């Protein structure tokens, strides 16, 4: 294992770094761009469609390049009323969120489109991971990416009609006609799911043999959810494969347009359903930016403590199932026993186990209960020796080492090209952890290391997760020893809901409480963004407010989505058994992929 001191130095975070605007102006001319002021923490620059690829290539090839296409998606702008900073006639838009590690800053490029001309050039030639993002935008909005090799449905089934994230597409099942599944329709839908290799540029055979096409999933224990991979096999060797996602799609982003700002919090829990309150964190932080809320220090420390508890919860499940995938049965029972101990603490503090939905806009649902410190101390006394046992008994086992070392390895350059974050990136030796690189919620006040490895293989990804659990225990202990006094909620009119004791004393507070619970708070019109180091990598929420009680656009960028897109590039030429070890090492859940 490496430590952060041995790896590439990441400079201090630069929010709204304006250097990139000067560089673009110098190369293309200032008249080429429209700058949109936002609360996203990065320059937001509108470019003409004709210049898009030239601008993206320029940013990709700068001396300090924007090496990662972090996110790419669209917005139906037609019903937006607050249009400050938007070019005239922007009826739809596509945005490209680019990340630079050498600068430790981001930039967002946007393109405006007319409803009758939804065409934009594909960016696959610049970043290979644009593939799935562009397919998702076509799926959700009907925006065509010229030059894309296979612009097919990604999340919706191939026979689906319409584009669900358009504003004129119904948001509730009751707005559709009653659903009827006739025998003929069922047959047609089943036939549409049949895999046709030629559609994906695959041959059915080589010079001397026929290839075998094998469905792994969507119901298979090693698929870790409703996930299908079609394998093109030459004997046991994987010639190519096609991951097939969308079986778990529930329209989480569409739901964000129909829920009030605070009633949407429980929906975030269900995205990475093993991340619990950690899913609430980027969402409420982004909403707090819109509202201009600064939370008390006690709130920050409570949030960090509970987020790290869920990091441990996630990693314990990952560890047990990963070792099980490569053939060992016993460890999963031990890891679930330890998860139960952590759940006892989580349940005592929040009242729930997996999905507490406990963070609030401006704070948390209630203060820490009496005796919380004893429960946390008991867990801290128990867990370190258990991690030692796991490492000794399981992770140093020769069979596990033989199944995972040198398997499904990739380097830092490849990881960044595919949008890999979290342990998958740090296992290649790249020291990029958002908690250190871009501290949020007061992480800069905590002492902890960023575990790294060097080989980027299935074994190293697991060992990085083990190191993260040890560091999470250190962070929780610091929260326990240094928990500040003070309120558990900000004193701000847009916090939800106001303190109950004040609603019983002041009629204005009671009225505010009634309006915010029944309608929800009204957030100022703007755009905000927040990323965090979640359990599986970087998770973020990009929110657009049009001055309403609901979000105009909620974009959820999850880490598991790009991690699964990378599978074919990593696993070609490997054995089927290597794929199983690779899938186990990624640490993904399908709700995090499909949303």
Image (cartoon, rainbow, N blue to C red):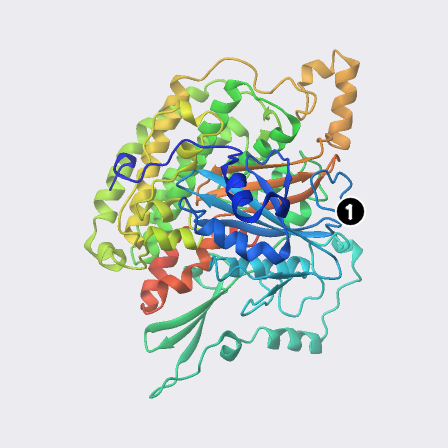
Please state the horizontal and vertical placement of residue 347, each as a whole percent of the image.
50, 31
In this rendering, would 353 be left or right of 555? left
* Residue 373 screen position, x and y as percent: 42, 20
Q: Where is residue 51 in the image (x, y as percent from the top left)?
A: 59, 55
Residue 369 visible? The answer is: no
- Measuring from the top left, give residue 371's x and y in whole percent: 45, 19
Image: 548 above or below 137: above
Q: How many marks?
A: 1
Q: In this view, does 213 lie above or below 163?
A: below
- The quadrant holding residue 367 is top right
Taking 256 as reference, is 130 left or right?
left
Name the quadrant containing residue 134: bottom right
Residue 501 at least partly seen: yes
For the residue carrying disc 1, how many other residues have a C-alpha within 10 Å: few (<14), some (14-19), or many (20+)? few
Q: Which residue is at 75% across, 47% downward? A: 88
Residue at the spot 78% in from the left edge and 47% down from the top edge: 79
Q: Which one is in front, 185 or 42?
A: 42
In the image, is residue 118 above or below residue 81?
A: below
382 to 242, vertically: above or below = above
Classify residue 137 as left or right of residue 57: right
Q: Circle 1 sits in a helix, a strand or a loop, which is it? A: loop
Does residue 430 appear left or right of residue 167 in this picture? Answer: left
Residue identifier under label 1:
79
Taking depth in this image into account, of 167 and 469 the one nearest to the observer is 167
Who is closer to the viewer here, 591 or 371?
A: 591
């Amino acid at each position: 294992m490496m430590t952060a001191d041995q790896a590439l130095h990441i400079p201090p975070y630069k929010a709204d770094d304006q250097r990139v605007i000067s560089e673009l102006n110098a190369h293309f001319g200032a008249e080429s761009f429209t700058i949109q002021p936002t609360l996203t923490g990065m320059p937001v620059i509108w470019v003409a469609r004709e210049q898009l690829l030239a601008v993206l290539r320029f940013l990709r090839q700068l001396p300090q390049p924007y090496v990662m296409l972090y996110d790419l998606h669209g917005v139906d702008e037609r019903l937006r009323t607050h249009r400050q900073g938007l070019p005239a006639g922007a009826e739809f838009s596509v945005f490209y969120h680019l990340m630079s590690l050498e600068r430790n800053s981001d930039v967002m490029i946007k393109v405006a489109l007319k409803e009758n001309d939804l065409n934009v050039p594909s960016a696959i030639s610049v970043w290979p991971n644009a593939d799935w993002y562009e397919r998702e935008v076509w799926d959700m909005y009907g925006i065509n990416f010229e030059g894309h090799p296979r612009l097919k449905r990604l999340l919706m089934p191939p026979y689906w009609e319409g584009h669900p994230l358009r504003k004129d597409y119904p948001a509730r099942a009751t707005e559709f006609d009653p659903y009827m599944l006739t025998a003929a329709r069922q047959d047609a839908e089943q036939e549409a799911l049949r895999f046709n290799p030629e559609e994906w540029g695959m041959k059915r055979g080589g010079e001397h043999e026929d290839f075998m096409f094998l469905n792994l999933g969507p119901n298979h224990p090693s698929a870790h959810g409703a996930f299908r991979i079609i394998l093109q096999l030459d004997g046991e060797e994987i010639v190519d494969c096609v991951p097939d996602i969308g079986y778990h799609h529930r329209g989480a982003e569409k739901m964000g347009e129909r829920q009030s700002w605070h009633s949407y919090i429980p929906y975030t829990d269900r995205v990475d359903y093993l991340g619990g309150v950690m899913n609430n964190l980027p969402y409420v932080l982004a909403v707090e930016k819109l509202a201009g809320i600064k939370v008390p220090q006690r709130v920050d420390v409570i949030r960090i403590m509970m987020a790290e508890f869920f990091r441990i919860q996630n990693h314990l499940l990952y560890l047990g199932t990963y070792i099980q995938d490569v053939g060992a049965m016993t460890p999963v029972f031990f890891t679930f026993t330890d998860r139960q101990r952590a759940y006892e603490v989580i349940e005592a503090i929040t009242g729930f186990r997996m999905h507490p939905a406990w963070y609030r806009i401006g704070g948390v649902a209630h203060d820490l209960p009496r005796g919380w410190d004893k429960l946390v101390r008991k867990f801290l006394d128990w867990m370190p020796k258990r991690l030692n046992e796991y490492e000794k008994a399981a992770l140093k086992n020769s069979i596990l080492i033989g199944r995972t070392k040198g398997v499904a390895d990739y380097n830092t350059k490849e990881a960044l090209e595919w949008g890999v974050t979290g342990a998958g990136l740090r296992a290649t030796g790249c020291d990029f952890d958002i908690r250190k690189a871009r501290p949020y919620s007061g992480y800069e006040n905590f002492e902890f290391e960023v575990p790294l490895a060097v080989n980027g293989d299935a074994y190293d990804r697991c060992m990085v997760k083990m190191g993260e659990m040890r560091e999470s225990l250190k962070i929780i202990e610091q929260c326990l020893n240094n928990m500040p006094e003070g309120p558990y909620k900000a004193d701000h009119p847009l916090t939800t809901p106001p303190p109950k004791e004040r609603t019983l004393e002041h009629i204005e507070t009671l009225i505010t409480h009634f309006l915010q619970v029944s309608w929800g708070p009204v957030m100022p019109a703007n755009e905000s963004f927040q990323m965090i180091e979640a359990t599986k990598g970087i998770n973020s929420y990009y929110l657009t407010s049009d001055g309403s009680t609901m979000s105009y656009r909620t974009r959820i960028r999850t880490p598991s989505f790009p991690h699964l897109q990378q599978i074919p590039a990593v696993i070609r030429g490997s054995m089927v058994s290597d794929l199983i070890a690779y899938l186990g090492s990624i640490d993904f859940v399908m709700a995090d992929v499909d949303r």
